[in-house]
Image (tube, rainbow, N blue to C red):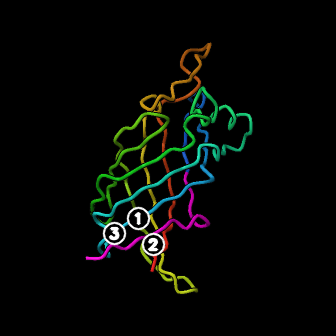
Amino acid sequence: MATTKWVLDPTHSELQFKVKHLMISTVTGSFNEFSAELDTDNDDFEHSVVSFKAGVNSIDTGNKDRDSHLIGGDFFNAADFPSVSFVSTSFTKDGDDYQLKGDLTIKDVTKPVTLAVEFGGTAQDPWGNTKAGFTIKGKINRTDFGLTYNAALETGGVMLGEEVKILGELQFAKQA
């Protein structure tokens, strides 16, 4: 059976992360530069192979000083580790949607992660391209990946939460 390649449509996709700050609110950030591919051998996407890569220097939290801190040595160390990557190990049906398992690499640490994937469906755009849409949700513990920077608060607790929520709205274009 022939494999079909789907590539990310970056103008209709976004990749975000959310982290607790001061344990009272959540800060949202995005990767403005990322790519992804989906290789499948059937129309329902089950057992597809998924990969993505995000450029660390493209982190955008809406605050330049915070972005510089995140790409620096206390966090992602973009000078030595310029990208975050993911390669799937399985993509299986979970009811009407999917469960995506794979290896996430941040800095020099690779760990298995599981992501929930909601399939939005397929459609043809006005130019005849077939598109597929997915919403991806998951969470990781940032310290598992060597992102350990934190600061103690005078009132107790810490400045940053360890849990990072991952959210993706991804649209793929079917390749001929």
Local SS, label 1: strand
Residue 71: % across, % down:
63, 36
- Quick check: marks 3 and 1 in contact, CB under 8 Å? yes
Does 96 appear above or below 114? below
Disc 2 vs disc 1: which is toward the camera? 1
> Which quadrant is home to the C terminus?
bottom left
Quadrant of res 1: bottom left
| Badge 2 or badge 3: first in the primary sequence | 3
Residue 127 located left or right of residue 103: right
Could you give the CA–CA distance between mark 2 and mark 1, rounded to whole angstroms? 10 Å
**Res 38 label:** 1
| Badge 2 or badge 1: first in the primary sequence | 1
Q: Which residue corresponds to mark 3?
A: 40
| Residue that sits furthest to the top in the current view | 154
Does 82 appear above or below 44? above
* Magenta segment boundaries in residue numbering: 1-15
> Residue at 46% of width from left, 34% of height from top?
108
**Res 132 label:** 2
